[in-house]
Image (cartoon, rainbow, N blue to C red):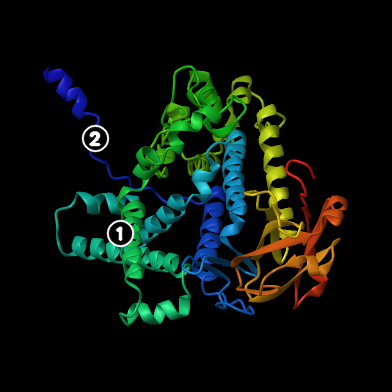
Amino acid sequence: MQAGIEEQSALYQKRIPIFPRSIHGPFRNFKWGVLGLAYGIFFGLVWLPWPRGEGPHQAILLDIAARKFYVFGLVVYPQDLIWLSLLLFIAATLLFFITSLIGRAFCGYFCFQTVWTDCFTWVERMIQGERPARIRLYKQPWHAEKIFKLGATHFIWLLLAFWTAFTFTAYFTYAPQLFGDFFSGQANPAAYWTTGILTLSTYVAAGLAREQICTYICPYARFQSVMYDPETLTVSYDEKRGEGKLGRAALRTDVKTLEARHAKGFGDCIDCTLCVQVCPAGIDIRNGLQYACISCGLCIDACNSIMRSIGFPPGLIRYDAESTLKQGQPPRLHWKRLKVLGYGAALSAMTGFLAYSVMSRVAFDQAVTQVRQPLYVLLSSGEIRNRYHIHIDNRTSRDETYRLDVRGIPEQAADFGNFRRVMVKGGKSLMVQASVTLPPAQAARTHAFEFVITPLSRPQDAHASPARFYFQKGIS
């Protein structure tokens, strides 16, 4: 019983702080570039003015209250839900496509958690020093220097978390007005709640939890293996080269050159552990592929820097596929695979369809449905009447007036009540009830006609919707 309790308690291990060492190299430079681009877009785009005829002059504005999403010159309405569905499908397919090719590259370079954690770690290093200094500070008892450095670190973390949360909130309202109202205490309570909750979550995720978000909370680390193949590029340690016959050996005088190491049976790895020290997840890549690895490539930069400094060839740790690594072949991208080609084809098709849907969007949409209960009405005069519902959807951001006509039947046969001309507000829809009455002889000759909807500001955009006329139940 006691053994069972001990085994169960081991599942809840206290977090061991990780203090990543800084490193220079192409992968680290790429990560800095992604961070700069991501921050420039996220923090700057909300303040980018975008003049438009109607609506706030803000490039990106997700106005939930008005049910309008402003994206540069495009206005998205709830009727455009298909676009959101396509975007989600494209995002999921792109993730699967990238993972099949180069593993968890999204996690290592583009994930929000990775980008914000990188910035928080940089702040920590600027205030507390490099890895050895941070470790010493962590182990030291509380004193004035420790209180000051930790306090300054957490204060800047909170400022960055707050500005992140405020910027996110600003995407849902007019940013300049929110700025003034927020700091004068006049903003909507929802703005304060949203900013407060996101400030706390950002501070905890990027400053305190860090790698635990990726390891224990994000589900991607758990199901990524189902998308891996032996041809998938991952951060790999060349065990055959690094271990040799007798394993690793420190860089001593008698094993300082490659020839001496190989003669004694040692591998190229000098067991400097720099690859472990730079890892934001705190893992040892030399133990093989692990679910906690986010494929950021920092261990590659670290190992290559050491290899070059001692005159050994780089590439002991590299992006490589399991298949080519075992065969001793040079790393290459295995893209000629059925799964990868299938993901690529689906991604291309859906992206093209979304682009076509956006580019071919019309200023208004209409639909004509016939009232089928009853299908037709026989009047006392012997005439036959059919009834219709005409739906007009204004997909512009401005109010528009529409004129309703008919084609293929006499104009006086159509009755629109007092709604032959209707005004539909921008982004709104309207339904008009209409009826068509024909004498029996003409009804027998009329099988189809058209309702013509014309926007008065753009008569050239008039559109005709076909409709059928039923003159006897079950026969048209």
Which residue occupies the extreme left position in the image?
A: 2
Q: From the viewer's perspective, is residue 310 above or below residue 139?
A: above
Q: Does residue 101 appear to the left or right of 267 in the view shown?
A: right
Task: Say which amino acid is labelled 2.
Answer: Gln
Query: In which quarter of the view is residue 270 placed?
Result: top left
Query: In which quarter of the view is residue 232 placed?
Result: top right
Q: From the viewer's perspective, is residue 50 above or below residue 86?
A: below
Q: Residue at x 37, y 44 (%)?
A: 213
Distance from Cα at disc 1 to Cα at disc 2: 23 Å
Where is residue 65 drawn, in percent x and y? Answer: 46, 68
If you read the primary sequence from the N terminus, does the residue marked by circle 1 or circle 2 appear first? 2
Q: Does residue 384 appear to the left or right of 162 in the view shown?
A: right
Which residue is at the front of the view, 461 or 9? 461
Where is residue 408 drawn, in percent x and y? Answer: 86, 61
Quadrant containing the N terminus is top left
Q: From the viewer's perspective, is residue 447 above or below residue 451?
A: above
Where is residue 90 drawn, in percent x and y? Answer: 62, 45
Q: Is residue 284 visible?
A: yes
Task: Say which amino acid is labelled 1.
Answer: Leu
Q: Secondary structure at mark 1?
A: helix
Q: Residue at x 69, y 69 (%)?
A: 416
Label at residue 13: 2
Which residue is at the front of the view, 30 or 463? 463
Residue depth check, mark 1 versus mark 2: number of the one nearer the observer: 1
Which residue is at the front of the view, 117 or 420? 420
Q: Is residue 251 visible?
A: no
Where is residue 9 drawn, in percent x and y? Answer: 19, 29
Q: Residue at x 37, y 40 (%)?
A: 282
Quadrant containing the C terminus is top right
Pointer 1 local density, CA inside 10 Å: few below 14, some 14–19, many at least 20: some
Pointer 2 local density, CA inside 10 Å: few below 14, some 14–19, many at least 20: few
Q: Which residue is mark 1?
A: 200
